[in-house]
Image: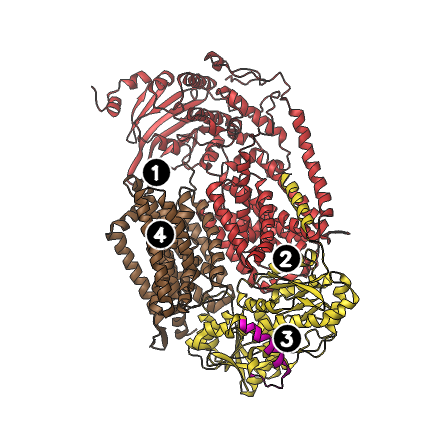
Amino acid sequence: MDWFVFLALLQDGITTGAIYLLLAIGLLIVFSVTRVIFVPQGDLLAFGTLTVAALQSGRLPGTLWLLDGVSVLALLASLFQGRRAAMRGLLAWGLYPAAVTAAALLLAPRELPAVSILLALAIVTPMGPLIWRFAFRPVAGASVLALLILSMALHFVLIGLGLVFFGPEEASAPPITDASFDLGSLNVSGQTLAVLASCGVLVLGLRWFFGATIHGKALRAAASDRLGARLVGIDAGATGALAFGLASFIAALAGVLIGAITPLSYDAGFDIGLKGFVAAIMGGLVSYPMAAAGAVLVGVLESLSSFWASAYREVIVFTLLIPVLVWLSLRSGSPEDRA
Amino acid sequence: MKARLFAAVMAMGMLGATAAAQAQIKIGAILSISGPGAAMGVGYKGAFDFFPKEIAGQKVEYIIRDDATDASTGYTIAQKMISEDHIDAFIGPSLTATDAAVAPLANQAHVPMIAMAPYEYDPTKQPYTFNDAQPLPLMVAEVFKYMQQHGVKTIGYIGFSDGWGDQVLAGTKQAAAADDMKILADERYARTDTSVEAQALKLISVHPQAIMMGNSATPAALPVVALRHLGYKGGIYGNHGIVSPAFIKVGGGAVSGVIADTSPLVVYTQLPDSNPIKAVASTFMKEYTAKFGPQSVNPFAGYSYDAMLLLQGAIPAALKVAKPGTEQFRRALRDALEKTHGLVGVSGVYDMSPTNHNGQDSRAAVLVEVKDGAWRAIQ
Amino acid sequence: MSRIAPPSGLVRPSAIAAAGVEAPPLPASGAGLRPGHGARSLRRCIAPLAAAALIALVPAILPAFYVTLLGYVGMATLVALGLVLLTGISGQTSFGQASFVGLAAYATTVLTKFVDAPPLAGLAAGLVLTGAVAWLLGLVTARLSGHFLALVSVAWGISFFALFGTIPQLHGFSGIGNIPPLRLGPLSAASPRVNLAVIWAAVAIVMAMSASLLDSRLGRAIRTLNGARLMGASVGIDTVRLSRTVFVIAALYAAIAGFLFAHFQRFVSPTPFSLGASIDYLFMVIIGGAGSLWGAPVGAALVVVLRDQFNDWIPRITGQAGDFESLVFALAVIVLLQRAPDGLLALLARFRRRSAPHIEPDAGAPPETPPAAAATPGEELLSLDAISRNFGGLAANRDVSFSVHAAEIVALIGPNGAGKTTLFNVISGVLPPDSGSIRLFGAAAKRLSPRRVAAMGLARTFQHVKLLPGRSVLENVALGAHLSGRAGLLRCMLRLDRAEEARLLSAARTQAERAGLGGMLHVPAGDLPLGQQRVVEIARALCVRPRLLLLDEPAAGLRLPEKQRLAALLRHLRAEGIGVLLVEHDMDFVMQLADRVVVMDFGQKIAEGPPDRVQSDPAVMEAYLGGVA
């Protein structure tokens, strides 16, 4: 293999690695605050791609109606929970979806990429808090395992909905930029740079958010000690919703970005989510820098094994996960007894 | 204890609820409506909307089920159709792997089956298996003829890592040997893969004059995009499984110039009027495009339609021998199918015999190229 | 040294009588039978006969497709049974069971189709291959906790699925068809109906074996794997090895299913062995209920039959075929997880009475537990020399030295946070000391595991009670007798352990009555008030036939008469030559009972001596009260 090939593979690997990193971050945020291993995040990524593709062809995506429908349920639920909750509910689950729907009705026919992308983000992001509200919050105290099984079940729900809304065909997202330029003999696409840039901006943005804003600090508090956070008045339900909201925003963004490079179908998100999840595991489900390293490693490993032994790629990536998991588990101590 | 009783009682109840048999013809269709093969499945299924509800005075019921692009699922569905629904014939399966799974079943139960995907079988050992999808070697040979005419001597191959990829490779090797060409590389990828950069790089590194693809539907666009993105300038050829509008939509500008061959149906408007297929295709497509739009023309609907035409031609003879729902009827149906001669379909003209249950010749293949955002016949 | 060993179950421990609390009347002499025993054993014979009759008759009369459907239900039940044992009972979640099904299916396919071997050879190959892979994986997973284990199972599930699809000899996704049918010599099971009978016969056998296993000494031990491993180790259970054993058993059940599947459907491709299939099995167990073996067939039947029905009806309703039944199922699972996390059977069980364990303790036969080694008076049982243990910067134990002898009660007291429980953990092998040495029964004991320590004769109770709350008091106490039993896996599964089991339960009953629990032997331990639960722990510890007993706050939560009974029991044990080291906060209790008192504060020993001397020690008063008044 010559240098050119290696660089091309590296570029490919780093681009996919950046997407895996984004997903890993989302997974880590959700897990640390709610102990949910958010498997369906990959499906939300596919939703992002398919939603923006639908908008770009002038159609209204099924996800919009899903948002409206479930928002109504959330609104009704909040009306029974006291005035403050009702006010918040009206804003979040009444006004917001209505505004998004109106915007979609008006602007979708114009088929402008920037608008479609923003609308897609606006539609898919609230799915996170809604999933939290109806699927996980009722059993928030359950064991990690029970929550994981719930996650898996939810994945099938989203897949089924995806097939109904978008059909079986693949679709592409509009590229942020069509530009590409040459770095020596290597051709670097503008979209790749967009992916890396977005990743960088998001990471920095999250650092600022967690470090400097009160909501971010509340999230960190809830992540490090849930009971303690509740004792000082941090609302467990709200932090959970925020965590899921961040994760679904990240997933939607990742979908919009990667969808321009690779057409995705309704069931292609799971695989991507799984690899992002591998990256998060490499960080022990606690460490962001390790997850970043893991993400790049997975991306590059995948790329290289595609080249050398394309049929066995999946086997290699997932078998390598086992020793990592074992090492992590042994490091975190012997099996705990239930108190 | 309780569970077994429960299951047994439920089973009895369902037995009682089974509808009484009527004098009607039942045709079972196993199509890939979900999963990776779904893009083709949409086409296969769409044709059923225009099938006659009555043939030779008998009502016809079409039972359509989804095998989710999986042979095991298809197998289970086939079992149920044979023993529960008592179908008289199969249209499909539409997936090669499912064909392989279902064919032994159909032959054992003496149910005629018109497979709709390229599938290798021996008509003398499987007398109940028929196939209206053009044999792969036939289609590949036509493409290779074109390649040879244009001076191609070395090729690289990229295909699915499953049975289809294997089949096309076998046809490729056959044609390459016949036309004195060398295969320099053999790369594979899974239908659900999202990136084939590595495989494309590998192909380019051996510098083939042309690339032959063994894939189908929208995942086929991926290697083309990758190859062009990496700067490959040689010709890219595909098999008939890639010819669909979705391929162009997903591939965008990169797939311009890809050459494959396809059923006459796909470019029916560009056929000469002297071609008998044009008339049949026009009738069918008039209704089809009226419902699904002008962009919806695809070869897969054509296979379904041809299967229906074949059965429509054979059923009157079978009815003379026995009633539908009986084994004698199915046997007579099979015999009548085997005697089909000169039936003009939309994917070709069919001449069956005891040793040839496909019945197509080179009239079934038309060379096409992606030009100006659509598939155009090469004159 | 004499010890109170009741010659039959009829003797009431005199200490309890002296405390003025009546023990419940024991059944009439010798017979060991309870009313209704005869009726129950008749009922027990009916079940297998009825099962055999159903298995023989039902396949003959069902329509062909339902034969196929029930076949799938049966095979799924086998896998689900393994999952019940693995996930429901022993607490190890696996998202990779379908891989084991696949391994065996492909093994038998390759052997019977390509090598022309008889199907039994295929079965053997499948079992051996799957067992070996599971054993290897088990080496890795037996030490993994909770969700890490689940994630590893996801990893191998995907890995094997990819492997099945890529190894060229296995024909990938085109699958391998025309697999020969089951046959045994001249008998052939080519007919699906005969095959169905074979499948359900296998289910019946596996289910009976599993039930026997759960009903036995090993069954009790397996239950401790689910969140009470520390307690299991403290009575001598080899938790790591047992976890692996259960894991392999579950894999072997799946392998049997895989073998049957290959010869029933006679077509294999990778898809039935994917991650989705593994998740399906888990769903079956969740819907049916993971806590009971019956959850397996119920869940399997519901899932398989409903999926088939959905496949039929939903396209007719929506006009579209698609992934709808997955969607509906997943929604059902979500609702179940939120409302009835123990599955449907558990929901129904709330309306049924709980049943007593199947074996009656044999009150006639003497308990044949190996006698504790006769202790010489004054023998040093435990000796600590400069034990230190740190946690990060915190010195939990600092240079602690003292000893405990036979026939003495030593009390370990001190304010909260003094390091007493840490010291217990060090002594009982849960934590290794950072420095210092321990001698236990005369032998160096610094790096011994809790299990080893229990085998040597040390038993303990825990500060936070560790019981199996859903099981009866008798079964919990019987856990202590684990090391007294010898029945291995096969004997337990084949019900050859009944005599030994009767003896174990009888011994447990004795100890339970000794501790004053005679009236509540069959009450679920979790239903008792906390103080009584501690007494259950003590009875369990006694079953270990210890020479040294470590009690962590045994009197907490007890009322005065109960404390008196406990004190009397401890005095009795001392008279038998057992050494007792106890942590307590109740000063009256301690001072009247203890021979010696050791006082700890901030990890160090600050005083030691007879109770009255320690009580007036200025250092002690400073630690407790902040200074002499």
The answer, for residue A1, to whether it is visible in the render is yes
Q: Mark number for residue B135?
A: 3
Structural distance between the alpha carbons of marks 2 and 3: 26 Å
Which amino acid, by three-letter code, is at mark 2? Thr
Mark 1 vs mark 4, foreground winner is 4
Chain that is coloured red in the picture: C
Structural distance between the alpha carbons of marks 4 and 2: 45 Å
Place of residue B114 in the rendered image (x, y in percent of width and height, measured from the top left):
67, 68
Residue to which mark 2 is pinned: B76
Which amino acid, by three-letter code, is at mark 3? Pro
Structural distance between the alpha carbons of marks 3 and 4: 57 Å
| Helix, strand or loop at mark 1 | loop
Q: Mark number for residue A93?
A: 4
Classed neighbour count for the residue bearing mark 4: other residues with Cα under 10 Å, few (<14), some (14–19), many (≥20): many
Marks 3 and 2: in contact by CB < 8 Å?
no
Mark 4 vs mark 2, foreground winner is 4
Chain that is coloured brown in the picture: A
Which amino acid, by three-letter code, is at mark 4? Trp
Which amino acid, by three-letter code, is at mark 1? Asp
What residue span does the magenta drawing correspond to?
B270-290
Q: Share a chain, discs 2 and 1? A: no
Structural distance between the alpha carbons of marks 3 and 1: 76 Å
Q: Give the chain of mark 3.
A: B
Q: In this orientation, which residue lies closer to the viewer: B12 or A9?
A: B12
Marks 4 and 1: in contact by CB < 8 Å?
no
Q: Mark number for residue C434?
A: 1
Q: Share a chain, discs 4 and 2? A: no
Left/right placement of residue B161 relative to residue B91 reads left
Q: From the image, which quarter does the C terminus of chain C lie in? A: top left
Mark earlier in primary sequence (2, 3): 2
Place of residue C553 in the rendered image (x, y in percent of width and height, measured from the top left):
38, 25
Q: Give the chain of mark 4.
A: A
